Image (cartoon, rainbow, N blue to C red):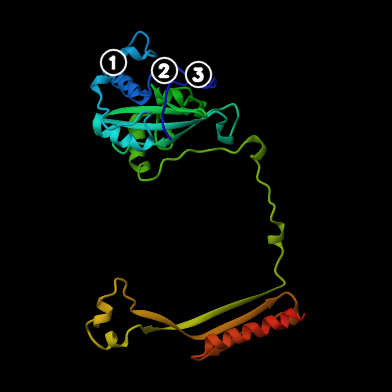
Amino acid sequence: MTGGTYLKLHEDIRGKKSLLNIQNRTNSKCLFYCIAAAKLQERGEKLHDPQRPGGYNLAELNMLGISFPTPLNQIRKVEKQNDVAINVFGYDSDGSGSDSDTPCFYPLLISDVHGEGRTTVNVLLISNEFTHHYVYIRSLSGLLTNLSKNCRQKFYCVRCFKGFMKEEHQMEHYELCKQFDAQHVAMPPESEKHLNFKSFRKTVAFPLYIVADFECLLQDTCKECAEKTEECEPCKKLNTKKYKKHEPCAYALKVNSHFPEWDFPVEHYRGEDCVRKFLERYFAIYSFISQV
């Protein structure tokens, strides 16, 4: 997946002031325009018309070895060369099946270098059938206001979109959340919001079933090692050492049924040939049932 030349925002999010769609119509450097916009915002500088690419100085950015349009697999390289932390988010206009009136945003690629004095750059990756385009996210809180009925500013976790009223609470949460993969919650559509039980056949009891259990003795895998305090030469060469193995010595078997003529008493057998005896008994029961 790559980011390409300028694309218009979908009508559902076109009016969001939290998004800055820089009109790089003549090149495919939309990601670097987003980085330049983030650095200006961090310094508190404002442009008269921030959507025009002419106000951004890309000369201060290191684009050595970067492809244009920039693919997601080069984001880590861009971060390293420009001392930034880039979070890439995706967008689904139909709400990912949850609600056709609510756009759905989700994390695509989250930086691993947050909190190291780097400029944080949040970008939205949009696309059409021909190309992709990066859009700068001025305020993640403003972009995700539709996730809550509370319109107050929140501090959102970039990995799971959980909102917090205080930044210190969000930072505490992030230390735990970064141990897991980034994710987002997708609610079912209106037509599927109720669950219906369909597997009625699983509620019908089996007319007959067999319960069996084996008893085993733990035996040494290598008699030579068991008789000595040190391992033998063949065992020393093995990466995975098996010290014990289970040797079946007995079994118990019970045929259960709500029909009295098929409900047999518990059977026991003990001996070295218990596995063979069990299989013989099992197939004998199977033959009996098949004739009923």
Whether residue 56 sits left or right of residue 277 in the image: it is: left
SS at mark 3?
loop
Q: Is residue 150 above or below residue 176?
A: above
Task: Judge whether residue 3 can be spotted in this image.
Answer: yes
Taking depth in this image into account, of 51 and 195 the one nearest to the observer is 51
- Screen quadrant of the C terminus: bottom right
- Screen quadrant of the N terminus: top left
Mark 2 is on which residue type?
Arg
Task: Judge whether residue 83 can be spotted in this image.
Answer: no
Task: Specify the farthest residue to the left.
Answer: 230
**Mark 3 lies on residue:** 14
Taking depth in this image into account, of 126 and 157 the one nearest to the observer is 126
**Mark 1 lies on residue:** 44
Q: Nearer the viewer, mark 3 or mark 1?
A: 3
**Mark 2 lies on residue:** 25
Q: Is residue 220 above or below residue 114?
A: below
Going 39% across and 14% down the picture, which residue do you hit? Answer: 51
Mark 3 is on which residue type?
Arg
Relative image position of residue 36 (x, y in whole percent)? 30, 21
Q: Is residue 89 above or below residue 175?
A: above
Whether residue 24 sits left or right of residue 101 in the image: it is: left
SS at mark 1?
loop
Tell me the distance, in whole angstroms, between the alpha carbons under discs 2 and 1.
26 Å
